[in-house]
């Protein structure tokens, strides 16, 4: 999916994906494909800028649209209360954040945020923060190298 051209609205937090249309978002836009693609994947790569240690608004909208992949009932996971997952497949999550210059505090916040997001999906993850000027070609090379690295994990 080309997320640059996609029309993805915000999650309404209406819980229809939990009860009325289990596992399927009722918002009729390109974001409806995100949960299905995630549930069918071995690797979920989430690439975004970093804003104040978090995701920019457009990236946050994309991530929030994964909500249909969680079940409305809860369970204990690593000593914490979390939603059960709707599907058995748990893709490895690769988070790649970019910030224009070194910002250790933002890096730490982003790393913690991605860790908590991976815990919510009860899966393994890796977080990488890229900094400085990156051309599109340099970013593509970095992403391909990371995807190859992650693909070689045990």
Image (spheres, rainbow, N blue to C red):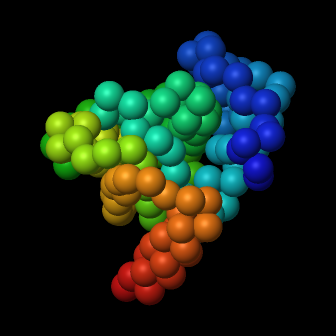
Compared to residue 106, the image places residue 43 above or below, namely below
Relative height, residue 117 to residue 96 (above, below): above
Placement of 45 over or under 141, stated as above or below: above
Q: Which residue is at a point 61% across and 59% down the rendered structure image?
A: 136
Seen in the picture, residue 87 relative to 137 is either above or below; the reply is above
Q: Residue at x 69, y 54 (%)?
A: 37
Q: Nearer the viewer, residue 114 or 20?
A: 114
The quadrant where residue 139 appears: bottom right
Q: Quadrant of residue 104?
A: top left
Q: Position of residue 20 (x, y in %)?
A: 71, 21
Residue 121 on image: x %, y %: 42, 48
Residue 118 can be seen in this image: no
The image shows residue 97 at horizontal and vertical percentages of 41, 49
Q: Is residue 111 left or right of residue 71?
A: left
- Quadrant into which the C terminus falls: bottom left
Farthest-out residue, right: 28
Task: Give the total number of marks visible in the rendering.
Answer: 0
Compare residues 14 and 134 and report the one nearer the observer.
134
Left or right of residue 151: residue 115: left
In this rendering, does residue 13 appear at all?
Answer: yes
Residue 49 rendering spot, x and y as whole percentages? 47, 41
Give the residue drawn at x 66%, y 27%. 17
Please give the name of the residue rendered at 62% of the width and 15% of the height, measured from the top-left corner.
Answer: 12
């Amino acid at each position: 999916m080309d997320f640059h051209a996609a029309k993805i609205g915000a999650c309404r937090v209406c819980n229809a994906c939990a009860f009325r249309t289990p596992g399927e978002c009722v918002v009729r836009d390109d974001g409806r494909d995100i949960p299905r693609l995630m549930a069918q994947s071995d690797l979920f790569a989430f690439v975004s800028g970093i804003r104040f240690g978090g995701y920019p608004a457009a990236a946050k909208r994309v991530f929030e649209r994964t909500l249909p992949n969680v079940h409305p009932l809860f369970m204990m996971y690593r000593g914490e209360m979390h939603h059960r997952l709707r599907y058995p497949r748990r893709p490895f999550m690769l988070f790649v954040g970019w910030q224009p210059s070194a910002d250790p505090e933002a890096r730490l916040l982003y790393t913690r945020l991605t860790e908590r997001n991976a815990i919510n999906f009860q899966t393994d993850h890796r977080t990488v923060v890229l900094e400085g000027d990156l051309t599109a070609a340099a970013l593509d090379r970095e992403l391909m190298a990371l995807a190859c690295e992650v693909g070689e994990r045990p």
